Image (cartoon, rainbow, N blue to C red):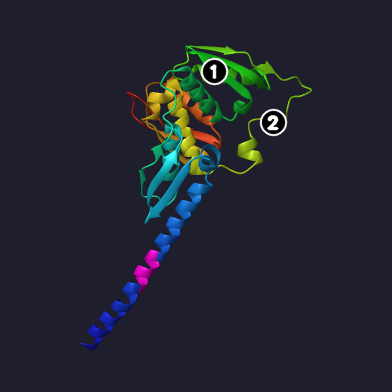
Amino acid sequence: MKKKLNRLKLIATVVPLFLISHHLFASETDDRIESSAKQSYVFKTFLKGDDINIQSRDGVVTLTGTVAEESNRSMVGETVANLPGVKSMNNKLIITDEGPAVYTDQWLIAKVKLTLLLHRNVNATATKVAAKNGTVTLRGEAISTAQKDLTTEYVKDVEGVTTVNNKMTILTAAIKPDEKTMGKTTDAMNEPIDDASVTALVKTTLLYHRSTSALALKTTVKTKEGVVTLSGKAKSGAEKDLATKIVSDVHGVKSVNNEMTIKGTKAN
């Protein structure tokens, strides 16, 4: 009887300590999730003007507040959902600006600008975009013919674009910046991009390219220390290769491990 009483006393002592320890651990995890979200590349780069509140309770995150457009709402949701410790996410963000009507010139300009911003080997900030009835005209500066051609290639692949008029000028050697550092100002010269942001940017990029938009909905993206792993099913080897090419040029991506299977074939 005495042994039983001692055992009950021990349990009565240990259980509260366990509950307190669990609560403290959960609280630390929640604080880390909220802090990591606010310090993420996506938040600091794309969401500066938005009013976003993040509340985590035992890894269940709720987002409230306002964002300017749907792409922002989607990116913040993807970023938070991929943070370590997040079990589930409830995105209650409200879009304050409905933006221009679909397929209008302003809508197309916004899509083109965001697409270019997602890639590191084009100069989005130095590229001026105009649109009229599906024809996009590009002006500004490129450091090389290759960069100019890549800009054209990306813009052609934006939904709604029918023709691209690329009138960008190629910088001369005398005023050209170091090509080795061009396009790497965020990735290498400043701070590393967190994996959650890389995952969000990759998913957004695949969605915004017309040739991979359908694929994006069926593709699983995981990032570890900048190495992106893609899984899912592609319609063909060409589509799989295109996904690798597009993802390789997203900010923060160090390399791509494409484990997608081709539709109609079995995985090894």
> Of 192 and 124, which appears nearest the observer?
124
Residue 42 as seen in the image, left or right of residue 188? left
Give me the disc on residue 153.
1
Q: Quadrant of the C terminus?
A: top left
Q: Secondary structure at mark 1?
A: helix
- Identify the residue at horizontal 42%, vertical 56% (top origin): 30
Residue range (magenta): 17-23
Residue 123 as seen in the image, left or right of residue 70? right
User: Alpha-carbon distance for marks 2 and 1?
Assistant: 21 Å
Q: Quadrant of residue 126?
A: top right
Image x and y of residue 158, in percent:
47, 20
Q: Along the polypeptide, which appears first: circle 2 or circle 1?
A: 1
Q: Which residue is outermost to the left? A: 1
> Within the magenta stretch, is there residue 19?
yes
Image x and y of residue 214, in percent:
38, 24
Mark toward the viewer: 2 or 1: 1
Give me the disc on residue 27.
none
Q: Secondary structure at mark 2?
A: loop
Please name the amino acid that badge 2 sits on: Lys
Image x and y of residue 194, in percent:
53, 44
Question: Would residue 224 be visible to someone looking at this image?
Answer: no
Give me the disc on residue 180.
2
- Identify the residue at horizontal 39%, vertical 41% (top origin): 93
